[in-house]
Image (cartoon, helix red, strand yellow):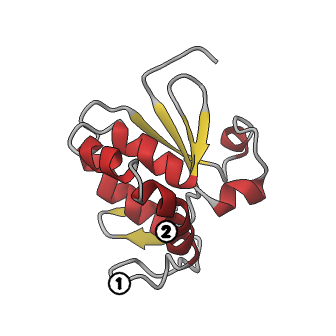
């Protein structure tokens, strides 16, 4: 795949927490460098060299150079693409935060629906997330 300046974020488009997080991140994407892709779409899933189970476990990002990162590393990549938040990524990428980051990411992923302020799990075909309605 030829290099681009776009970060492709493979996310679960039926996950209310994922969509809620997207609404928090997108306003910082002043350069339109992030492209959110719903891997529930078979044509999107076919672009990823991962199984559906792998995609369900962690956020995956295809970097502008075609390299793939997931989980905590994906968040570091995403933050680095956003000028106003890049400093957070630089700090989180340093020890000891880098050492604990993957475990922290795993904790958040496992408990995403019970975190304070997080939206509840979507149980229907139509999800309402603050700032966005999707089908």
Element marked by disc 2: helix
Q: Position of residue 51 (x, y in %)?
A: 79, 50
Q: Residue at x 41, y 78 (%)?
A: 119
Q: Is residue 69 above or below residue 100?
A: above
Give the quarter of the figure containing the N terminus. Answer: top right
How crowded pointer 1 is (Cα within 10 Å; few <14, some 14-19, many 20+) is rated as: few
Element marked by disc 1: loop
Q: Marks 1 and 2: in contact by CB < 8 Å?
A: no
Q: Is residue 66 above or below residue 27?
A: above
Front position in the image: 53 or 23: 53
Q: Residue at x 38, y 49 (%)?
A: 94
Residue 56 picture quarter:
bottom right
**Outermost residue toward the left in this view:** 84
Q: Residue at x 55, y 58 (%)?
A: 13
Q: Is residue 84 left or right of residue 123?
A: left
Front position in the image: 45 or 111: 111
Q: Which mark is residue 116?
A: 1
**Outermost residue toward the front in this view:** 95
Q: Position of residue 108 (x, y in %)?
A: 49, 72
How crowded pointer 2 is (Cα within 10 Å; few <14, some 14-19, many 20+) is rated as: some
Q: Residue at x 45, y 28 (%)?
A: 6
Name which of mark 2 and mark 1 comes first in the sequence.
2
Q: Position of residue 12 (x, y in %)?
A: 59, 58
Residue 133 picture quarter:
bottom left
Residue 61 picture quarter:
top right
Q: Is residue 84 left or right of residue 114?
A: left
Q: Give the residue at mark 2.
A: 104
**Outermost residue toward the top in this view:** 2
């Amino acid at each position: 795949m030829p290099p681009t300046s776009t970060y492709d974020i493979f996310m679960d488009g039926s996950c209310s927490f994922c969509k809620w997080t997207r609404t928090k991140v997108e306003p910082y994407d002043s350069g339109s460098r992030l492209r959110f892709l719903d891997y529930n779409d078979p044509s999107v899933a076919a672009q990823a060299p991962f199984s559906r189970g792998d995609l369900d476990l962690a956020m995956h990002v295809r970097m502008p150079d075609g390299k793939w990162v997931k989980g905590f590393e994906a968040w570091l990549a995403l933050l680095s693409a956003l000028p106003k938040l890049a400093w957070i990524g630089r700090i989180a990428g340093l020890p000891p935060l880098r050492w604990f980051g993957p475990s922290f990411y795993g904790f958040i992923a496992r408990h995403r629906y019970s975190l304070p302020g997080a939206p509840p799990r979507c149980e229907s075909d139509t999800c309402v997330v603050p700032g966005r309605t999707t089908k």
